[in-house]
Image (spheres, rainbow, N blue to C red):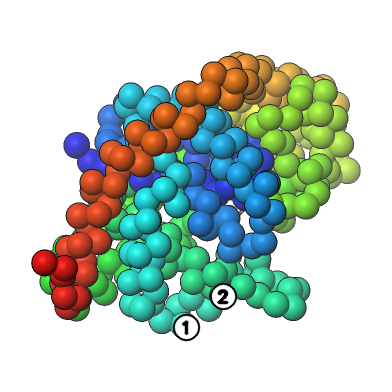
Amino acid sequence: MSRVLSGIQASGQLTLGNYIGAIQNFVKLQESHECFFMVVDMHAITVPQEPEALREQTESVAALFIAAGIDPAKSSVFVQSHVPAHAEMGWLFTTLAYMGELERMTQYKDKSAGKDSIGAGLFVYPTLMAADILLYNADLVPVGDDQKQHLELTRDLANRFNARFGDYFNIPEGYTPKVGARIMSLDDASKKMSKSNPNPASYIALLDPPDVIRKKISRATTDSGREVKFNPAEKPEVSNLMSIYSHCAGLTLQEIEDRYEGQGYGAFKKELAEHVVATLEPLQARYAEIRSSGELHDILRQGAEQVSVVANRTVRDVKERMGFVMPR
Ligand code: ATP
Ligand code: MG
């Protein structure tokens, strides 16, 4: 059975972008693949995090995985820092990467833009991500569009390792949804929706109460026209809202266009908000149950135990191939 690995940073509240671009695929893939899903807390600290907030966000992301339908009986769910092999493998891969290729990463450029002091962790982020994936020799990596470049680097690093130290790694493939691989910000359709955006009006958080969702959608930026048409180049804001609509209502883009012909944006936004609310309400109810039941830490401990077996074996093999003396 082929293997899937993916993760989400504990860097804020999960958004509809994370749900549509990543988590919905996690839930589907667990039916047919061996799946490893992690909360990536060590990536989250590549930008400053308050300790209390990091703890809360880590638990919240893990609980949302389960609430969204990831079944711990089918998938291993764990926290990255609970498996020290990630940090170790991250260092080994940092030594294989070149400054030039890391400098080309658009996430690094976006997240460091306008900052006086840029953390070195932000720069080497992609080498830790490569380690995350290769530790499990994953075949498939479900990610949104924004992570494609990092995945390409992972493939390059796997090939580089194989060429220098002998064939060992699979070359992993990406897996992105056809519509919704890049959900854009509600206030600026030139930027992707991101949980670390300081402006909460730019995203819909999976835990936003219904009235907050309605307000955010009604205030979402649109063009001055009134035609509900999917045209990302000329109508990026409306097209983005249509992608969200399509996912939440299970309608095609064409069906949405037909439904709102001649009606303007008001009716479209109002019904969109109700579809988003209806999608998130059951998830929010399950989330509350999981947080109050206390079962989360058992799930995470079991997940870490399961994946450690694979991760520790890979680190040992990699170190042996690189020429480290193994303890005897
Ligand atoms: P941050 O702002 O801290 O980087 P993020 O919202 O970008 O947070 P990540 O943890 O970096 O979330 O990414 C988790 C997963 O969600 C990745 O697979 C990523 O590609 C996907 N993803 C993130 N944002 C979007 C988006 N706007 N549309 C679709 N997928 C997305
Ligand atoms: Mg991100």
Residue at x-position 39% and y-position 36%: 301
In the image, residue 64 above or below residue 180: above
Three-letter code for the amino acid on which mark 1 is drawn: Gly
What is the x, y in percent for residue 132? 37, 56
Quarter of the image where one finds residue 165: bottom left
The C terminus sits in image quarter: bottom left
Q: Amino acid at mark 2?
A: Ala
**Residue 163 showing in the rendered view:** no
Question: Image height check: is 204 above or below 158?
Answer: above
Give the residue pinned by disc 1: 100
Mark 2 or 1 closer to N-term? Answer: 1
Q: CA distance from mark 2 to mark 1?
A: 14 Å
Q: Horizontal and vertical percent for residue 293?
A: 54, 19
Q: Point out residue 149 in the picture as x, y percentages from the top left corner.
A: 47, 63
Say whether marks 2 and 1 touch (CB < 8 Å). Answer: no
Classify 10 Å Cα crowding around label 1: few (below 14), some (14-19), many (20 and above). Answer: few
Q: Is residue 197 left or right of residue 47?
A: right
Number of labels in the image equals 2
At x 70%, y 72%, the residue is 113
Name the residue that disc number 2 marks. Answer: 120
Q: Secondary structure at mark 2?
A: helix
Residue in front for this viewpoint, 221 or 305: 305
Above or below, 258 relative to 193? above
Question: Could you say whether the residue bearing mark 1 is in a helix, strand or loop?
Answer: helix
Disc 2 crowd, CA 10 A, few/some/many (<14, 14-19, 20+): few
* Label 2 vs label 1, nearer the camera: 2
Residue 48 left/right relative to 19: right
Quarter in which the N terminus is drawn: top left
Residue at 73% from the left image edge and 42% from the top image edge = 203
